[in-house]
Image (cartoon, rainbow, N blue to C red):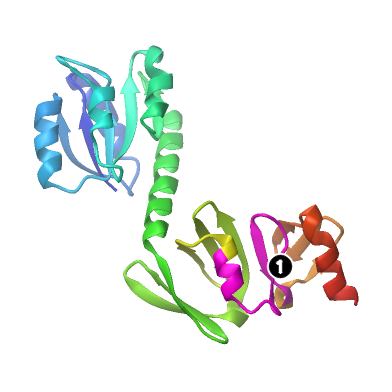
Amino acid sequence: MKCIIIDDEPLAREGIKILVTHFPDLQLEKQFGNIVDAREYIAHHEVDLIFLDIELSGDNGLDFARSLPEKIMVIFTTAYPDYAAESYEVEAIDYLLKPVSRERFEKAILRAQQSSRMLSALKNSVERIGDNYLIIKADGKFHKLMHDDIQFIVGLKDYVVIHTLHEKYLTGMNLKNIHNKLPLTRFMRVSKSYVVNKDKVTSFDYNTIYIKDHEIPIGKMYQKEFFDLFFK
């Protein structure tokens, strides 16, 4: 992730820079002591994540965050706890109080990485569903997933995670839509958030389905259909 630091205190910028060096996924592009210069840079360069102070000389980090494109993530770094509630109104990834510890910084980065994966997933798409396979577009490539290799699918809001025998694929489609396009004789909805390939079920009890090392809960409204399938 390409990131920049905006803070009017040189020592604070140096502190965040040192923390950034511990995370290979972060690529520090630039540091700024004011919003004017940062805004100019963002207009002409790709930025994924901003470490942003709130009380800046002559400016307010919250107001600046509100003006940013949705694709740019923000982690606030400030000495003042009073703005925490407002920071979440602008959908900030996290709110770090100075001095920032490495452990707390790591938690914020994990959240940013998860959010980045979700944003990428929403750009992915299911291109075609055939009789025994589906093709999804992800990371600029088309992937052919055989139905027989799909173990289960997890729904998370507007995207799904397709778990195959060897990989996981995130793609922008809700669980109901992808389930309706797959062969219903093979793929079962077993809860609000899960669709399973019934041929991959290794064991189960009244509350849980086991597919290898994965434990999948059975929703109450889906229990009868699930047990009818295996016992009738």
In percent of the image, x 38 and y 25: which residue is there? Answer: 87
Q: Position of residue 121 (x, y in %)?
A: 42, 58
- Which image quadrant is residue 146 in? bottom right
**Depth check, front residue: 197 or 149:** 197
Q: Is residue 165 visible?
A: no
Q: Position of residue 72 (x, y in %)?
A: 28, 42
In percent of the image, x 14 and y 47: which residue is there? Answer: 45
Badge 1: residue crowd in 10 Å (few <14, some 14–19, many ≥20): few
> Going by the picture, which residue comes out furthest to the bottom?
131
**Depth check, front residue: 141 or 186:** 186
Q: Position of residue 79 (x, y in %)?
A: 33, 14
Depicted 146 relative to depicted 171: above or below: below
Q: Is residue 61 magenta?
A: no
Give the residue type that dot 1 points to: Lys
The residue identified by callout 1 is 212
Q: Does dot 1 land on a helix, a strand or a loop?
A: loop
**Depth check, front residue: 142 or 16:** 142
- Which image quadrant is residue 60 in? top left
Q: Which residues are magenta?
A: 177-198
Q: Is residue 186 magenta?
A: yes
**Left or right relative to 70: residue 182:** right
In percent of the image, x 43 and y 52: which residue is there? Answer: 118
**Left or right relative to 69: residue 129:** right
Depicted 38 relative to depicted 163: above or below: above
**Depth check, front residue: 37 or 19:** 37
- Which image quadrant is residue 56 in? top left
Q: Is residue 151 visible?
A: yes
Depicted 63 relative to depicted 42: above or below: above
In percent of the image, x 60 and y 74: which residue is there? Answer: 150
In the rendered image, which quarter contains the C terminus?
A: bottom right
Q: Position of residue 170 (x, y in %)?
A: 47, 62
